[in-house]
Amino acid sequence: MATIKELKNGHFKITVSDGYDIRGKQIRYFKTWSPPKNMSESQRKKEVKRQALLFEMQCKNGETPVSESNIKFEKYAEQWIRDIASLQNKLRTVEEYRKLSVRCYKEIGHLKLCRITRKTLQNFIISMEKESLSLKTIKNHMALISSVLSYAVKQDIINANPCRDLIYPKQKQLHKKSEYYYSLEETITFLNTLPKAPLKYQAFFSLALFGGFRLGELLGLEWTDIDFKSNIITINRTSLYSKDIGMFSEAPKTKKSQRSNKMPQLVIDLLLQLKLNQSTQRKTYKEQWKNTNRLFVGTGGCPLFYSTPLKWLKRFLKRHNLPDTNIHGFRHLNASLLISSGIDVKTVSEYLGHSKPTTTLNIYAHTFEIEKAKASQALADQILPRLNMVNNKTK
């Protein structure tokens, strides 16, 4: 609804209310209209009503002109996350936007969209660099801001996106604490100790090693994802955790993550035992059993919580005096063994569910370099002894 107020200088202030933001504050748009001097009193009153009606229609249709909108970045970004990002992205992406928005709101949330300049954003980048944030983190923050402002351009609220041509700091070489991954010998020791564990964890970590699956992929597995005749397991979903909504499931991270891997009979036999064991538990709990159809469940059929497998692993390793590692370590070992076995990078990439082979190359570059060196040496060992030039030098 538009309201009209005549100002002392003879101009009119038009206000349009358009619902409420996430904090319950009313969203308002303002416009100042100046009547021509040659207009009569009746003509001015009639024309200002027409201007108010046109302005209200523009606001309702998201066509607010640049100079007529005073919406601040935080309010607009919250609307964008709620109305646009939530419809176009997976829940995990929206959660990431909300995490990034905290710092963005602190820096530019109070600014009107039309007041955000390239200099403003460049100063934001400089401030994040001073906090020693990584280049990736800095770019993620700016990507969120750019997405919001690009939408504002489409709505004709601002003329251009000031995120263009920003200067980013050089990538710093961060010295992260290196994670410890098992060798082949340590893995065999772990597998020989694993039968002492509960059946579900025997199955869980066997799948982690032989399938190279991610934690969320393992927790999202359902019995319908297993073809016991062909020993093939298909990843159709991933189970994740959010502080706001708890455990939730969604489609795999990328199209390539939705894949089918063949498992050795040892793993399939463990899964058959687990299925039988779960059927027995279901009969015991009767109607109290939560039939989620998940492979890995806790008491009463509830899906395992996201942090439970890692907590169990840490206790198990400590109890049996085994080297400490994490769940991703088994995926890393899976990749390393595939590479050292001579499997090409495209196949390894597909097996791990990477979006493209270059991702696999970047992550396991060192392993590939070692194997290339081995191949080069193997070639030299076969050829060099047969060359006359080498034999003559050694005589």
Image (cartoon, rainbow, N blue to C red):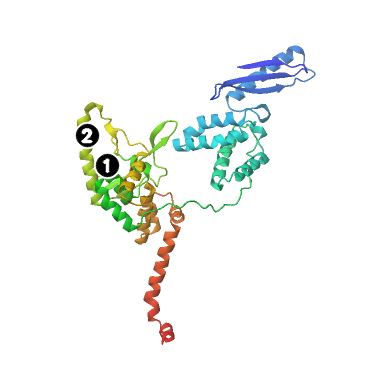
Q: Where does the image place residue 250, in percent across and percent down from the top left? A: 39, 37
Q: Quadrant of residue 158?
A: top right
Q: Where does the image place residue 373, in percent across and percent down from the top left? A: 42, 67
Q: Is residue 90 visible?
A: no
Q: Secondary structure at mark 1?
A: helix
Point 27% across, 43% down: residue: 226
Residue type at tag 2: Gln
Name the residue beneath numbered marker 2.
Answer: 281
Q: Where does the image place residue 82, in percent across and percent down from the top left? A: 51, 30
Give the total number of marks visible in the rendering.
2
In front: 116, or 37? Answer: 116
Point 63% across, 47% down: residue: 167
Q: For the residue carrying disc 1, how many other residues have a C-alpha within 10 Å: few (<14), some (14-19), or many (20+)?
A: many
The quarter in which the N terminus is drawn is top right
Question: Marks 2/1: CA distance?
Answer: 13 Å
Give the residue at the far top of this rendering: 42
Q: For the residue carrying disc 2, how many other residues have a C-alpha within 10 Å: few (<14), some (14-19), or many (20+)?
A: some
Q: Where does the image place residue 324, in percent across and percent down from the top left? A: 37, 50
Residue type at tag 1: Lys
Point 24% across, 48% down: residue: 195
Give the residue at the far right of this rendering: 38
Using residue 112 as the reference point, say whether residue 340 is left or right of it.
left
Mark 2 or 1 closer to N-term? Answer: 1
Name the residue beneath numbered marker 1.
Answer: 200
| On screen, residue 87 above or below 394 | above
In front: 340, or 195? Answer: 195
Using residue 265 as the reference point, say whether residue 381 is left or right of it.
right
